[in-house]
Amino acid sequence: MLAMPLHLEARHDLTPNEIDAIEDRFYEHNRHATGRHDGQRLGFVIRDDAGQIVGAAAGYTWAGISELKQMWVDKAYRGRGYARDLLEAFVEEARRRGVGRIWVASYDFQAPGMYEKAGFKRMAEFEGWPEGHVNVILCKTL
């Protein structure tokens, strides 16, 4: 059987469903490579009285580790401890799932200090990422 030629195309607008499908393929590869089949999404939201999401923490647990991929609180609700509440809930659920380490990336203009106050340690810093700023990688051992 002859192989059909493949075509490379620019797609700078992948949908969330397409990105999820790619993530699923990564997970399948990682499962096969490690024999670990315990991957689960992990997330919490905070809603206002109208039911709108005003804060969220999202990531995953897998193979005894966890990544906090997104942490966000609407500007109008910052400074009230909601990010801390989200982070504490995320860490406790990860701990309940048997996670030993959680990692997160945070730019210097975001919240690396908040993570450090919560017991995360700086593991790496990427200067000029973007130019004039630092991308900080932090890890917490549970």
Image: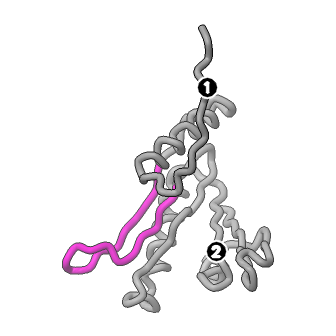
**Magenta stretch secondary structure, dominant:** strand
Q: Is residue 95 above or below residue 118?
A: above
Dot 2: what SS?
strand
- Can you give x and y, in whole percent of width and height, for residue 7 in the image? 59, 35
Tell me which residue sits at (53%, 39%) in the image. 38
Tell me which residue sits at (42%, 87%) in the image. 75
Q: Is residue 51 above or below residue 60?
A: below
Q: Residue furthest left?
A: 50
Q: How many marks?
A: 2
How packed mark 2 is, by other alpha carbons closer than 10 Å (few <14, some 14-19, many 20 or more), is many
Write down the residue under mark 1.
Answer: 5
Read off the magenta span: 41-59
User: Is 34 in the magenta?
Assistant: no
State the residue in front, 91 or 124.
124
Picture disc at residue 106:
2
Dot 1: what SS?
loop
Separation (CA) of disc 1 from disc 2 = 41 Å
- Can you give x and y, in whole percent of width and height, for residue 122 in the image? 75, 73
